[in-house]
């Protein structure tokens, strides 16, 4: 927790005469520090400090400004992408009132979940309308940098690299690694078509990064947060992430989510859901190569991978 005088020094880059009355750490971010700050001007802001990768500040600011007219995002009031005095890069953003989609889902109101899921689908379609000249990692600008991998069949080759990782191998049984390899290469032709798509992909379109609230009697997305993982790719990456814990036997967000996506003009191939799970399995395999991953998360991710390989609903974590 940063002391109030320290936060005040950062906030004053945007509000020179403001004082910090109260500050509360926001714990949903895994790689950056976020603080909800109450100012003497009767305003609430979020101070976001980029501790992991300094370049992400400029990338996120640029993306928010790119999509802000058509996608609900938190307004950037001030940013210091090069850092400020002895501090890493940070941004001061307007606080958006709402709760995470995850909180709404846990509350168990099926009508509210359906409304918010429809809005999430429509929001994702709006994100996907932004196009790039080619697929790849996004940097400040936003500009497209390197592709996932150079050459043909980048997705199955990338997964093979993950499966060979010294971090992943102790976490995933050998028989499952082999089944993942076989499955991805059996779908190589379909995946190659997806690799040609270069739309804006949020990269972490999960329920903790969607703020929702009830306006005019209906639940909808108030803001999409945390754009640091955004890439140019196929929107199925984001669909797969959002549906990661959905169970066809006990659906919660479907078909409302996909209906919202289609209603807002999004297009998908006939077998989109299976392909979305394959795209998300790629992300899960990459996550399993990370050095610091809690055992409970490893168990959960391996089960999600196994469920995709076996074409079944994942078991409850």
Image: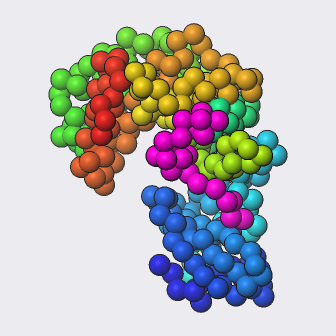
Image position, residue 186 (x, y; %) = 37, 11
Q: Viewer-proximal residue, 221 or 295?
A: 221
Residue 20, quarter of picture: bottom right
The answer to whether residue 105 is magenta is yes
- Side of 103 relative to 12 (left or right): left
Q: Viewer-proximal residue, 313 or 292?
A: 313
Residue depicted at x 74% and y 69%: 78
- Side of 132 relative to 310 (left or right): right
Image position, residue 308 (x, y; %) = 35, 23
Q: Is residue 264 above or below residue 222?
A: above
Quarter of the image where the C terminus is located: top left
The answer, for residue 97, to whether it is visible in the render is yes
Q: Please provide the residue range marked out in magenta.
A: 91-115
Q: Is residue 191 above or below residue 210?
A: above
Identity of the residue furthest to the right in this view: 69
Residue 281, quarter of picture: top left
Q: How is the image coloured?
A: rainbow
Residue 143, quarter of picture: top right
Q: Is residue 210 above or below residue 61?
A: above
The answer, for residue 90, to whether it is visible in the render is no
Residue depicted at x 78% and y 88%: 17
Image position, residue 188 (x, y; %) = 44, 14
Residue depicted at x 54% and y 17%: 272
The total of numbered circles placed on residues is: 0
Image position, residue 129 (x, y; %) = 74, 31
Residue depicted at x 63% and y 48%: 212
Q: Viewer-proximal residue, 230 or 7?
A: 7
The answer to whether residue 113 is magenta is yes
- Side of 25 relative to 185 (left or right): right
């Amino acid at each position: 927790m940063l002391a109030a005088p320290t936060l005040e020094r950062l906030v004053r880059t945007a509000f020179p005469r403001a004082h910090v009355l109260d500050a509360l750490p926001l714990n949903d971010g895994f790689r950056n520090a976020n603080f909800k700050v109450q100012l003497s001007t009767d305003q609430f802001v979020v101070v976001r400090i980029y501790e992991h990768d300094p370049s992400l500040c400029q990338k996120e600011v640029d993306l928010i400004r790119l999509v802000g007219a058509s996608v609900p995002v938190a307004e950037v009031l001030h940013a210091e992408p090069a850092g400020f005095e002895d501090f890493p890069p940070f941004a001061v953003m307007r606080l958006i009132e709402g709760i995470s989609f995850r909180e709404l889902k846990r509350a168990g109101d099926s009508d509210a979940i359906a409304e918010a899921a429809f809005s999430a689908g429509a929001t994702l379609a709006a994100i996907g309308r932004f196009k790039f000249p080619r697929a790849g990692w996004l940097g400040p600008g936003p500009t497209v940098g390197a592709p996932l991998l150079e050459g043909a069949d980048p997705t199955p080759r990338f997964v093979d690299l993950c499966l060979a990782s010294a971090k992943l191998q102790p976490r995933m049984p050998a028989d499952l690694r082999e089944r993942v390899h076989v499955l991805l290469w059996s779908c190589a032709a379909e995946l190659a078509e997806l690799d040609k798509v270069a739309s804006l992909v949020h990269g972490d379109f999960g329920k903790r990064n969607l703020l929702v609230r009830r306006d005019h009697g209906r639940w909808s997305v108030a803001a999409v947060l945390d754009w640091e993982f955004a890439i140019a790719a196929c929107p199925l990456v984001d669909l797969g992430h959002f549906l990661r814990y959905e169970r066809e036997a006990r659906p919660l967000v479907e078909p409302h989510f996909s209906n919202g996506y289609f209603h807002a003009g999004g297009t998908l191939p006939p077998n989109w859901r299976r392909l979305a799970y394959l795209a998300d399995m790629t992300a899960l395999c990459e996550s399993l190569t990370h050095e610091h991953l809690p055992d409970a998360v490893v168990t959960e991710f391996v089960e999600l991978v196994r469920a995709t390989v076996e074409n079944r609903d994942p078991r409850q974590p």
